[in-house]
Image (cartoon, rainbow, N blue to C red):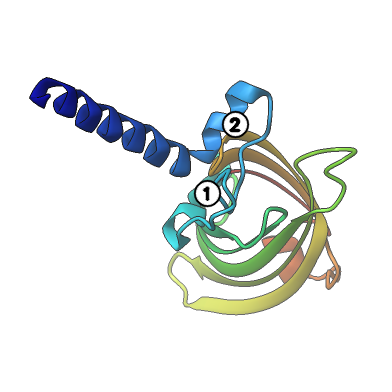
């Protein structure tokens, strides 16, 4: 009788473990069934914790060697608000240096911060294609060697599209094309953006 009792207890423990595993199934496991991973909930419909909806990443911008030399970084933190909506914040810093003999020795330091939202608007036709809107504030400091420095700021609303190639549930490669709705052809806008069109490659 004790032997049978032990078998019943072990079987109960195993079955409860399997059931718990099903309740806490990782949404990424849906890939094996040919389905996209859920972004905000478990397969049983339970909402994912706040931390499991966060995405971290960024990109490299202003990458150029030679004269001028330019290099920058642009970190991003995003939150999966719903299955189709991402919101986030980002920042960037770009260092640019012009040197003799072709230029007057000048250093540019450019800082920016932005808030953005991305909405997957036609998932039944093209999955992972997002409407993308953001507000970006940029400050640029120009310092000519042997002289003082000048600083100016610009705020721009940007609107366009982002295509995301998912790598996992919380990470992907993003190609973004935006249009600056506030662009004007002046020296400050040309220095910061170059044109009204903004192209980015980022990872989050």
x and y percentages locating residue 118 in the rendered image: 72, 58
Residue in view at x 56 percent, y 56 percent? 104
Q: Which corner quadrant of the image does residue 110 belong to? A: bottom right
Q: Residues within 10 Å of mark 1 (few under 14, many from 20)?
A: many
Q: Is residue 58 left or right of residue 183?
A: left
Q: Residues within 10 Å of mark 2 (few under 14, many from 20)?
A: some
Residue 187, placed above or below residue 82: below
Q: For mark 2, what is the residue?
A: 30
Residue in view at x 24 percent, y 28 percent? 8
Q: Pointer 1 and pointer 2: residues touching (CB < 8 Å)?
A: no
x and y percentages locating residue 83 in the rendered image: 68, 53
Q: Which corner quadrant of the image does residue 180 belong to? A: bottom right
Residue closer to the observer: 158 or 53: 53
Numbered label tally: 2
* Mark in the foreground, 1 or 2: 2
How far apart are the two marked residues, 1 and 2, measured between alpha carbons? 27 Å
Q: For mark 1, what is the residue?
A: 58
Q: Is residue 19 left or right of residue 127?
A: left
Residue in view at x 43 percent, y 69 percent? 146
x and y percentages locating residue 86 in the rendered image: 65, 58
x and y percentages locating residue 61 in the rendered image: 57, 47
Residue 72 shows up from this direction: no
């Amino acid at each position: 009788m004790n032997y049978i009792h032990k078998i019943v207890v072990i079987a109960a423990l195993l079955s409860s473990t399997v059931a718990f595993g099903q309740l806490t199934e990782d949404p990424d496991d849906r890939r094996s069934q040919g389905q996209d991973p859920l972004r905000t909930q478990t397969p049983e419909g339970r909402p994912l914790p706040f931390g499991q909806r966060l995405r971290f990443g960024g990109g490299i911008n202003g990458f150029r060697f030679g004269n001028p030399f330019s290099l920058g970084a642009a970190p991003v933190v995003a939150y999966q608000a719903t299955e189709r909506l991402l919101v986030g914040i980002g920042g960037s810093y770009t260092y640019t240096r012009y040197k003799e003999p072709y230029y007057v020795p000048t250093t540019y330091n450019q800082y920016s911060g932005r808030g953005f939202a991305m909405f997957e608007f036609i998932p039944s036709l093209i999955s992972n294609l997002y409407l993308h809107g953001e507000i970006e504030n940029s400050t640029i400091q120009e310092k000519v060697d042997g002289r003082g420095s000048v600083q100016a700021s610009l705020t721009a609303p940007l609107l366009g599209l982002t295509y995301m190639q998912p790598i996992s549930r919380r990470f992907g490669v993003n190609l973004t094309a935006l249009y600056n709705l506030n662009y004007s052809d002046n020296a400050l806008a040309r220095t910061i953006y170059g044109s009204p069109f903004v192209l980015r490659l980022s990872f989050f």
